[in-house]
Image (tube, helix red, strand yellow):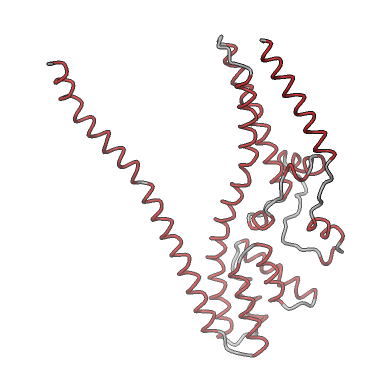
Amino acid sequence: MTTLQISLALGLVVGLGVAGIAYALVPVQPDLGDVLARLSPPARRRSGAPTASVDPDIEERLGLWAERTLPTRLLGVPPARDLAVVRKTRAQFYGKKVLYGLLGMVLPTAVTGFFALIGLRIPFVVPVGATLLLSTVLFMTPSRDIGQEAKRARTESARALSAFIELCALERNSGAGTVVSLSNAAEVGDSWIFRRISEELARSRYNGQPPWDCLEQLSEDLGLPELAEIADTMRLANDEGSQVYRQLRARSASVRSALLSAELAEAGQVEERMYLPGSLLGVIFLALLMAPPLLRLLSAS
């Protein structure tokens, strides 16, 4: 190791130490939502966020350790709605971030060791920079993955809610009450969103709350505006005694139309992305056709 590399390594260590001391001395801004959730009584706490499992795996154990040990600003604010809709805990989210970050720190070192075994010497700055860059990129990857999973989960939930609206309309058309219509419609399906709706309706009966208020809270926790519209429609039917069969059927049709439009738009984007590979294949085919005459022409000249 040369003198320059030793100087860079010592400077990196000193810089990290100074940054760590400065970070520790800066007062931490607590998360107001977490503080209020811990101070509120258990009966008033929201039930949207999944709780930790009884037998956590390695990833969740690592996330629990990160929550207790690492500063919150380093881990970042967890996407509560996205985690709730994909049915994952904060510990699983943090555990995946820490695990990916450790993987980014290990991979450059392993590659550098492999090159050293075969006799290739890599400058010290290259693995250090690759470690910092790769660990940072991989540490931020779970946030993007959770967002994509939540988008797919909300699309599936919208399809299920379209069927739920139809079932509520049929129950109301057959003469059932507002609360009974919601309960009977929720008991038909076996998907997770139907089970969550059934749980919230049962909780509303036990707590003496209107079911549409619980559905609105569930819509806010999961980020499902369709569920809030169902709650508003059923509240209107209960308060004014109006017939909401046509409104529910129209709302179900609009949800299906929106889903169809989104799928068509996505299909159009995929088709546009396929133009580039097709163009490259055409260029390669033309190159294969033109190569023999050009080679003969060059050899003849």
167 or 143, which is in the foreground? 143
How far across and down, in percent of the image, does residue 40 sit? 85, 63
Q: Quadrant of residue 175?
A: bottom right
How far across and down, in percent of the image, does residue 80 sit? 69, 56
21 or 279, which is in the foreground? 21
In the rendered image, the vertical position of residue 92 relative to residue 250, given as above or below: above
Residue drawn at the location 35% of the way across and 43% of the way down: 276
**Residue 51 left/right relative to 183:** right
Residue drawn at the location 75% of the way across and 39% of the way down: 62
How far across and down, in percent of the image, does residue 92 sit? 70, 46
Q: Quadrant of residue 27?
A: top right
Q: Return the residue found at the far left.
A: 300
Residue drawn at the location 72% of the way across and 41% of the way down: 57
Residue drawn at the location 60% of the way across and 12% of the way down: 116
In the rendered image, the vertical position of residue 167 relative to residue 61, given as above or below: below
Query: Which quadrant does the C terminus fall into?
Result: top left
**Residue 62 left/right relative to 246:** right
Query: Which quadrant does the N terminus fall into?
Result: top right
272 or 15, which is in the foreground? 15
Q: Quadrant of residue 200?
A: bottom right
210 or 267, which is in the foreground? 267
How far across and down, in percent of the image, does residue 208 sit? 79, 77
Number of numbered markers? 0
